[in-house]
């Protein structure tokens, strides 16, 4: 029985590690997507777009392993909760990869022109940095199940929300001079970054619930 339990725990640990690895991948994807749109780097944008297929593949593989474990082991209580949480976390991370993909697609669409007006580069750069930091912290939360850090992620999201509001404020200024097309691009970009961070918060909330059995307030 002890051996069976040990094998089962190894399987759970492998699932958790695959989610940590996936978190690192989506962080890199968003970092590269941000660089591509700030520098009009078409090659980097194409790399981000292509990497989304790998993220999807890893997420699907993780889900398949979780479903297989549930079918074979028929876990209950905390073990079942951990596996169901892993499925939901994988879905959030896959969506984060999609959002990085969307950022890169705007960079590709506007190449060789700059997608971001010069006076808004700083805001978009800050949004990209905030996205990467929050994802890196989320990876630590998954790996360590640190509930205090999980709550920090939610607070960190306030920075992204403030940057998003700042970006939208710039777009609705009467002095806006860059046309409707650029305004639409930036509205979408702001939404992509904001939703990306929201998914990271969702992951951290799921870990908090997994550990405590309570929803983060």
Image (spheres, rainbow, N blue to C red):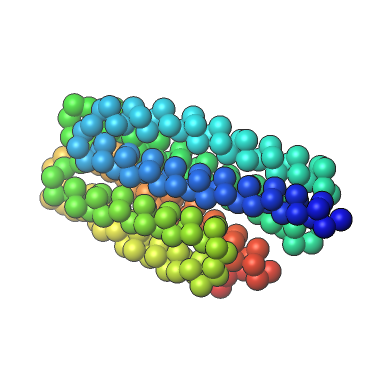
Q: Nearer the viewer, residue 71 or 200?
A: 71
Image quadrant of residue 82? bottom right
80 left or right of 56? right
Task: Indicate the position of residue 159 as horizontal and vertical percent values.
Answer: 34, 63
148 left or right of 1? left
Give the farthest residue toward the right.
1
Determine whether 15 is above or below 151 in the image: above
Determine whether 27 is above or below 209 in the image: above
Determine whether 94 is above or below 127 in the image: above
Res 181 visible = no
Q: Nearer the viewer, residue 49 or 145?
A: 145
Task: Indicate the position of residue 202 as horizontal and vertical percent values.
Answer: 53, 57
The residue that appears at 50% across and 44% down in the rendered structure is 22
Image quadrant of residue 29? top left
Image quadrant of residue 212? bottom right
Task: Indicate the position of residue 61 as horizontal and vertical percent values.
Answer: 62, 35
The residue that appears at 34% across and 27% down in the rendered structure is 46
Q: Quadrant of the N terminus?
A: bottom right
The residue that appears at 43% across and 32% down in the rendered structure is 51
Give the farthest residue toward the front.
3
């Amino acid at each position: 029985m002890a051996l069976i339990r040990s094998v089962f725990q190894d399987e759970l640990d492998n699932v958790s590690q695959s989610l940590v690895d996936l978190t690192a991948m989506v962080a890199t994807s968003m970092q590269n997507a941000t660089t591509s749109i700030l520098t009009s780097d078409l090659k980097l944008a194409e790399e981000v777009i292509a990497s989304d297929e790998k993220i999807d593949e890893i997420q699907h593989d993780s889900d398949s392993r979780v479903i297989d474990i549930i079918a074979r082991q028929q876990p209950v209580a905390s073990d079942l909760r951990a596996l169901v949480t892993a499925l939901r976390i994988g879905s959030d991370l896959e969506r984060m990869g999609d959002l990085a993909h969307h950022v890169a697609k705007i960079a590709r669409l506007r190449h060789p022109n700059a997608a971001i007006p010069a006076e808004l580069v700083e805001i978009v750069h800050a949004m990209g940095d905030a996205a990467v930091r929050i994802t890196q912290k989320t990876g630590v939360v998954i790996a360590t199940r640190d509930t205090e850090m999980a709550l920090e992620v939610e607070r960190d999201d306030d920075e992204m929300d403030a940057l998003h509001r700042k970006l939208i404020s710039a777009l609705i200024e009467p002095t806006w001079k860059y046309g409707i097309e650029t305004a639409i691009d930036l509205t979408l970009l702001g939404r992509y970054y904001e939703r990306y961070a929201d998914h990271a918060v969702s992951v951290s909330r799921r870990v908090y619930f997994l550990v405590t059995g309570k929803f983060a307030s």
